[in-house]
Amino acid sequence: MRVLTVSVLLAALLAGPAVAAARLPTADQVAAYVRENWDDYARRLDGAPASPTLLAVKDVRCRDLSGAPDCAFTVTVRLADGVRRDQVLASSFEWAPDGSLEEVVVLRSPLRST
């Protein structure tokens, strides 16, 4: 019994620290956040000369990235000339103390190859 316990503890230590799974936002929560913060997102669109009108947020896909929600989504916009366009955007989030979403900037260091 003692050997089994030591083996389990050793395996847990070698696996490294456990990262709690992130609570992922729903598609509706992400869409609401994008709508509320559209001015910030509009600046990220490729080649949009003026602030486009947001028509839809769709195809929301969120994943747990090292304990933080990371989401990709497609926005449908209408440009100033009336052309409609889809573009994929992404955001990393964290949960504010009041339970709302907050976008965060995630800095990742490059992997070292030795």
Image (cartoon, helix red, strand yellow):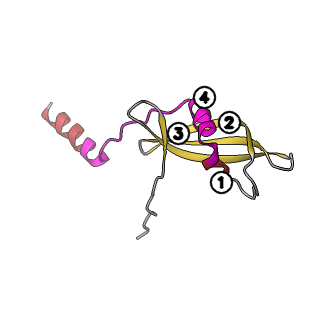
Toward the bottom, the furthest residue is 114
Please give the range of residues in magenta. Answer: 11-39
User: How many residues crowd mark 1 within 10 Å: few (<14), some (14–19), many (20+)?
Assistant: some
In the picture, the quarter occupied by the N terminus is top left
| Nearer to me, 3 or 37 | 37
Q: Which residue is labeled 2 in the image?
A: 59
Name the mark nearer the viewer: 3 or 1: 1
Provide the secondary structure element on which disc 2 rests: strand
Name the mark nearer the viewer: 2 or 1: 1
Callout 4–callout 1 Cβ contact below 8 Å: no
The residue lying at 41 percent from left, 36 percent from top is: 96
Residue 78 rendering spot, x and y as whole percentages = 80, 44
Kind of residue at disc 2: Asp
Please tell me which of labels 4 and 1 falls first in the chain.
4
Name the mark nearer the viewer: 4 or 3: 4
Q: Disc 2 versus disc 4: distance between alpha carbons?
A: 11 Å
User: How many residues crowd mark 2 within 10 Å: few (<14), some (14–19), many (20+)?
Assistant: few
Q: Which residue is labeled 4 in the image?
A: 28
Q: Disc 4 versus disc 1: distance between alpha carbons?
A: 22 Å
Marking on residue 64 = none
Residue 12 lies in magenta, yes or no?
A: yes
Please tell me which of labels 2 and 1 falls first in the chain.
1
Q: Which residue is labeled 3 in the image?
A: 63
Marking on residue 43 = 1
